[in-house]
């Protein structure tokens, strides 16, 4: 196709050859003579076109008619490559024809016809190039066999002489009639196929009809019209344009785009059912990119059919692609980071997490950045490439919450007071309905600089971070009550020293705690270092939670 278009551009230009004889019709070389003939027939100046024919005896008065018939035959059967036609006044000396040049050969029903240009003397004896007398003599038979026949008698002459995109108007009329006739047939075929699909696979018929009814009809219409056109004798230019398969490429590209739409809908539905609806933010740009690839592929296929060197174009695009990739490296990193976040799912939209030294709730995972609302209610935007590489602590996915306070008792606390607290705090944890019995411990772990340290280790069995804070608050208050019951206090670290006497411990409570420990020893109920299972089972869940006085407590008191 590209070669044809290049050839057509040469028709509109005149070639000047210094060694060629001067001639009013530019017939000094085979190429210029052919160009002059084509130009004259394109302008419907058949009197001028007759000057390029070497008319045999008896045909002198039929020059314009024969020129018109020859142009129709050449348009339908032979496209001469002007680049291969000689531009020398002597013609092509390598073809074995002394004074003639062969433009081509047309195969007829009974014989083949050589289309020849011949070097003949002008009236003044100067040698010029015209269509050979033998070729001119064959024009009536060529017209009868390869012309339009009865159509020429039925339609006006301009329908055969005028051209649009190098194709005669009569052929455009023929194409429109075939397309109009093929359209209802294609619609009927598409309806039959969809009806059969509804009978065979009703669960997918609606989706197929919604996405593919349009492209399916167009594809069937194009295929049916092309099949009919291949049985009709058109022209070389029409056949060349048909090789581009423009409508077929459009129909296939449309079908490919609708396939992507259907796939995107199905994937979005699966993401919704699996709780990954936020990933649709990635699905949209990926779908657009795939559609762009299909459109570019369709354009390249069309250009290839047109005769352009697509490999050269692809080489240029690859170099440009490398430059664009280098320039958009950070953007690509963030896109891949988004893919990582959606595929690995360390966090998802709505999760409360800790990242770096901050905590917050994930509000959006976009293509470039993740938006997180902090406890201060501000929004932090973190690039996906950076966020995906962080150590992320997803607090929303905890199946339990760790409760591990350190009780720093005053140094004056006696060993029996510590034993009292070890037992009572453990019993408190075992008795609490929101605390798991395993793993759980309370240990006297350290002699601090200004305190005696008890470490508490337990897990709170609640699903949310907020509820874990509620339970921890309840445990802290109960432990403070136990510390007070033991007759001791928690220390408060300070850097300031005061010249005042310290407060004395509650002597009565201290004695009461030591008496209770003595009773436990005597009754062998001092559960140190561990509570026996039967003791845990006895107290498990015996505490009221929420505590008494809360409107949510079991007894409402």
Image: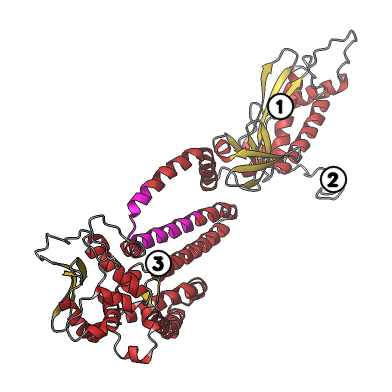
Percent from the top left, x then y, of residue 446? 67, 17
Residue drawn at the location 69% of the way across and 45% of the way down: 464
- In the image as oriented, which residue stretches furthest toward the top? 499
Is residue 313 highlighted in magenta?
yes
Residue 261 in the image: state x and y as whole percent: 51, 64
Q: Which mark is residue 422?
A: 1
The overriding secondary structure of the stretch rendered in magenta is: helix
Q: What is the number of callouts on the image?
A: 3
Q: Earlier in the sequence, mark 2 or mark 1?
A: 1
For label 3, the crowd category at 10 Å Cα-Cα, with few meaning under 14, some 14 to 19 and many 20 or more, is many
The residue to which callout 3 is attached is 249
Q: Which residues are magenta?
A: 289-315
Q: Earlier in the sequence, mark 1 or mark 3?
A: 3
Front-lying residue, 162 or 228: 162
Quick one: SS at disc 2? loop
Give the side of residue 482 with respect to residue 102, left or right.
Answer: right
Residue 375: image location, x then y, percent: 74, 38
Helix, strand or loop for disc 1: helix
Which disc, if any, is residue 550? 2
């Amino acid at each position: 196709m590209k070669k044809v278009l290049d050839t057509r551009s040469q028709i509109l230009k005149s070639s000047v050859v210094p060694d060629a004889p001067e001639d009013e019709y530019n017939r000094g070389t085979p190429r210029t003579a052919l160009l002059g003939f084509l130009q004259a027939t394109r302008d419907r100046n058949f009197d001028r076109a007759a000057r390029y024919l070497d008319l045999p005896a008896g045909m002198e008065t039929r020059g314009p008619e024969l020129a018109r018939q020859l142009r129709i035959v050449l348009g339908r059967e032979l496209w001469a490559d002007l680049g291969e036609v000689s531009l020398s006044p002597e013609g092509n000396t390598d073809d074995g024809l002394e004074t003639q040049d062969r433009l081509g050969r047309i195969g007829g029903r009974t014989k083949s016809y050589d289309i020849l240009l011949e070097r003949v003397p002008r009236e003044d004896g100067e040698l010029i190039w015209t269509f050979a007398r033998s070729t001119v003599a064959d024009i009536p038979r060529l017209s009868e066999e390869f012309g339009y026949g009865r159509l020429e008698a039925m339609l006006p002459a301009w329908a055969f002489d005028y051209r649009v995109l190098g194709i005669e108007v009569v052929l455009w009329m023929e194409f429109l009639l075939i397309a109009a006739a093929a359209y209802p047939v294609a619609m009927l075929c598409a309806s039959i196929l969809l009806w059969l699909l509804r009978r065979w696979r009703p669960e997918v018929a609606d989706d197929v009809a919604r996405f593919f009814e349009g492209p399916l009809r167009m594809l069937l219409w194009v295929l049916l019209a092309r099949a009919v056109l291949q049985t009709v004798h058109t022209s070389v230019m029409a056949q060349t344009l048909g090789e581009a398969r423009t409508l077929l490429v459009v129909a296939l590209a449309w079908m490919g785009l609708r396939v992507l739409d259907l796939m995107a809908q199905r994937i979005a539905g699966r993401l919704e059912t699996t709780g990954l609806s936020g990933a649709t933010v990635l699905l949209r740009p990926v779908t657009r990119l795939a559609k762009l690839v299909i459109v570019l592929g369709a354009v390249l296929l069309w250009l290839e059919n047109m005769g352009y060197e697509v490999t050269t174009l692809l080489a240029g695009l690859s170099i440009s692609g490398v430059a664009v990739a280098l320039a958009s490296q950070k953007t690509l990193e963030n896109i891949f980071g988004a893919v990582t976040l959606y595929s690995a799912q360390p966090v998802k939209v709505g999760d409360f997490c800790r990242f770096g030294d901050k905590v917050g709730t994930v509000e959006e995972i976009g293509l470039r950045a993740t938006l997180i609302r902090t406890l201060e209610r501000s929004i932090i935007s973190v690039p996906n490439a950076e966020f995906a590489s962080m150590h992320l602590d997803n607090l929303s996915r905890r199946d339990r919450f760790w409760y591990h306070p350190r009780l720093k008792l005053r140094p004056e606390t006696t060993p029996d007071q510590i034993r009292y607290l070890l037992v009572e705090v453990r019993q408190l944890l075992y008795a609490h309905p929101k605390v798991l019995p395993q793993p759980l411990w309370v240990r006297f772990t350290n002699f601090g600089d200004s305190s005696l340290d008890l470490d508490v280790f337990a897990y709170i069995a609640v699903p949310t971070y907020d509820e874990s804070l509620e339970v921890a608050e309840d445990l802290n208050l109960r432990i403070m009550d136990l510390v007070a019951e033991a007759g001791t206090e928690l220390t408060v670290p300070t850097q300031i020293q005061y010249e005042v006497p310290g407060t004395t411990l509650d002597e009565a409570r201290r004695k009461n705690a030591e008496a209770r420990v003595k009773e436990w020893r005597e009754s062998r109920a001092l559960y140190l270092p561990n509570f026996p299972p039967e003791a845990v089972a006895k107290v498990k869940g015996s505490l009221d939670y929420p505590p008494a006085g809360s409107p949510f407590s079991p007894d409402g008191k």
